[in-house]
Image (cartoon, helix red, strand yellow):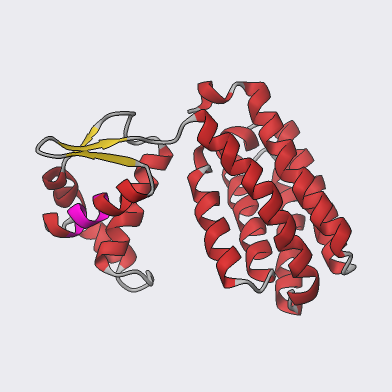
C-alpha cells in the first residue's frame, strides 16, 4: 500500500489523481485486467492506499479515453484496446513519428544526439545477447528521445500516450530477436539521417519503421497478442 506513495511521491510530476489515473491505465494496458472486468473503487483504493475519490475521478477520465465503460448504478468495466485500435494507433504513429523525425533534424541538441547514439549502441549490444528486458527499455528510450528532439511539446505528449497504449504489443514484437535486430538497423538509419540533417530521409525511414512494426505484428496475429 505504501509502495505506491513511496515510488511516486518524490519523482512523479502528477497530482494524486493523475498518479492514480496513470497507474490504472498502465494496469489496463499491460493486461492486468481482462476485458469487461469490473474495476471496483474500494479494491483499487485499498491497493493504492488512497480514498475512493481519486479512483472515481481516474475512472471517469479513463472513460473519456475509451478504456473504461461506466454503467450507472452498476460500476466501471474494462474496455481495453481492440486489434483495430492497435492497428489505427500504429498507422497514426507512422505519420506523426515521421513528422517528429523531420522536426528533429532541425531541433535536436548535441546532448540528445549523444544520448541517441548511446541508445543505438547499447541496443545492438543487448540484442546480440538476447536481453529482452533491456531491448524493450532501450526501444522506449529511442522513441522518447525522438519525441523530445522534435522540439514540439504537443507531439511529444501525444506520441508518448500512443507509445504507452501499445506497450504490451511492443513487448511481443520485440521478443523476436529477428525483429529486434531489424528494429536496431532501422533505428540506426533514422539516427544517421537525423545526424546528417536529412529531413526527407529521416521522415521516410521513420514512417517505414512504424509500418514495418505493425506488419510484423499482423503476421503474428494481432488478436492473439491482446
Residue at 52% across / 43% down in the picture? 167
Would you identify the image quadrant in which residue 3 lies? bottom left
Q: Residue furthest bottom?
A: 110
Image location (x, y in percent) of residue 54? 19, 59
Question: Is residue 61 in view?
Answer: yes
Q: Which residues are magenta?
A: 54-59
Look at the picture and state if 152 lies above or below 52: below
Residue at 53% across / 31% down in the picture? 84
Question: Chief secondary structure of the magenta span?
Answer: helix
Image location (x, y in percent) of residue 2? 20, 59
Image location (x, y in percent) of residue 196? 90, 68
Look at the picture and state if 14 lies above or below 95: below
As for residue 58 lying within the magenta part, the answer is yes
Q: Is residue 192 left or right of residue 2?
A: right
As for residue 219 lying within the magenta part, the answer is no
Q: Is residue 219 left or right of residue 80?
A: right
Residue at 70% across / 44% down in the picture? 210
Residue at 35% across / 55% down in the picture? 22
Residues 55 and 185: in front is 55
Would you identify the image quadrant in which residue 216 lies? top right
Question: Is residue 128 in view?
Answer: no
Number of marks drawn = 0
Q: Considering the image in quadrants, where does the N terminus appear?
A: bottom left
Q: Is residue 37 left or right of residue 208?
A: left
Would you identify the image quadrant in which residue 8 lies? bottom left
Image location (x, y in percent) of residue 94? 69, 47
Q: Is residue 86 left or right of residue 77?
A: right
Amino acid at each position: 500500500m505504501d509502495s505506491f506513495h513511496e515510488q511516486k511521491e518524490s519523482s512523479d510530476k502528477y497530482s494524486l489523481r493523475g498518479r492514480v489515473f496513470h497507474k490504472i491505465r498502465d494496469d489496463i494496458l499491460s493486461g492486468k485486467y481482462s476485458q469487461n472486468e469490473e474495476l471496483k473503487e474500494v479494491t483499487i483504493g485499498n491497493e493504492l492506499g488512497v480514498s475512493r475519490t481519486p479512483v472515481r475521478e481516474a475512472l471517469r477520465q479513463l472513460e473519456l479515453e475509451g478504456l473504461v465503460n461506466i454503467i450507472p448504478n452498476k460500476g466501471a468495466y474494462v474496455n481495453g484496446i481492440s486489434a483495430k485500435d492497435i492497428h489505427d494507433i500504429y498507422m497514426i504513429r507512422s505519420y506523426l513519428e515521421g513528422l517528429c523525425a523531420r522536426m528533429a533534424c532541425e531541433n535536436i541538441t548535441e546532448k540528445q544526439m549523444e544520448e541517441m547514439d548511446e541508445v543505438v549502441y547499447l541496443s545492438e549490444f543487448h540484442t546480440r545477447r538476447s536481453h529482452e528486458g533491456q531491448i524493450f527499455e532501450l526501444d522506449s528510450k529511442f522513441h522518447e528521445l525522438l519525441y523530445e528532439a522534435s522540439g514540439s511539446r504537443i507531439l511529444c505528449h501525444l506520441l508518448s500516450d500512443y507509445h504507452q497504449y501499445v506497450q504490451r504489443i511492443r513487448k511481443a514484437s520485440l521478443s523476436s530477436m529477428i525483429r529486434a535486430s531489424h528494429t536496431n538497423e532501422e533505428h540506426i538509419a533514422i539516427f544517421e539521417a537525423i545526424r546528417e540533417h536529412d529531413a526527407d530521409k529521416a521522415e521516410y525511414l521513420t514512417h517505414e519503421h512504424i509500418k514495418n512494426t505493425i506488419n510484423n505484428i499482423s503476421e503474428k496475429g494481432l488478436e492473439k497478442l491482446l
